[in-house]
Image (cartoon, rainbow, N blue to C red):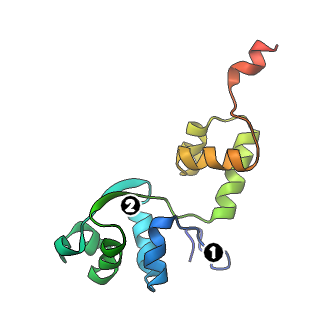
Amino acid sequence: MNEDGNTSRPRYFGAVYMPLIEAGFRAEAERLAQKWGGLKRYVPGVDHLRPTSPLARLIGYEAARVLAEAFGPSHLYFARGADRGHLKARIVHALDRGLRPREIAQETGASEEWVRRVRATIGMEPFTRWDAAAHG
């Protein structure tokens, strides 16, 4: 189920969640995206993973082991999971309104980087408010 309660549209997850989803831990990926989405957090190596580690307490030891095997030990950025189509539409609409990436990120809950990527995929040039004033 998506954050908006809709089960018909798939929720988008960044690449860091794929090992979990492929191993059958979709609910754990949802929980991880909800709690750690937008943050950079430590994933221990398999040899140092403990049931008491923050990651294991959040998603369970077996799911944490999947991430530890795939990425540990390292600090990872956990993207915010979102209904990709809905979020992208909101970002495009905000870009059309002339908002800057930081403002859009604050308004939508997306990262500034994701806003810039969306802007690039639709072929929109970086926007500056001073362009309009300069060309009066």
- Left or right of 22? Residue 118 is right
Q: Amino acid at mark 2?
A: Trp
Secondary element at tag 1: loop
Marks 2 and 1 in Cβ contact (< 8 Å): no
Mark 2 lies on residue: 36
State the quadrant of the N terminus.
Answer: bottom right
First in sequence: mark 2 or mark 1?
1
Q: Amino acid at mark 1?
A: Pro
State the quadrant of the C terminus.
Answer: top right
Tell me which residue sits at (55%, 46%) in the image.
113
- Left or right of 83? Residue 29 is left
Residue 52 visible: no
Mark 1 lies on residue: 10
Q: Position of residue 45 (x, y in %)?
A: 24, 69
Judge by depth and name the residue closer to the eye, 114 or 72. 72
Q: Position of residue 52 (x, y in %)?
A: 17, 73
Secondary element at tag 2: helix
Tell me which residue sits at (58%, 50%) in the image.
114
- Left or right of 113? Residue 41 is left
Q: Residues within 10 Å of mark 2 (few under 14, many from 20)?
A: some
Residue 94 visible: yes
Tell me which residue sits at (64%, 57%) in the image.
87
Q: Position of residue 73 (x, y in %)?
A: 26, 64
Judge by depth and name the residue closer to the eye, 5 or 101. 101
Q: State the residue lying farthest toward the bottom.
A: 24
Tell me which residue sits at (69%, 45%) in the image.
120
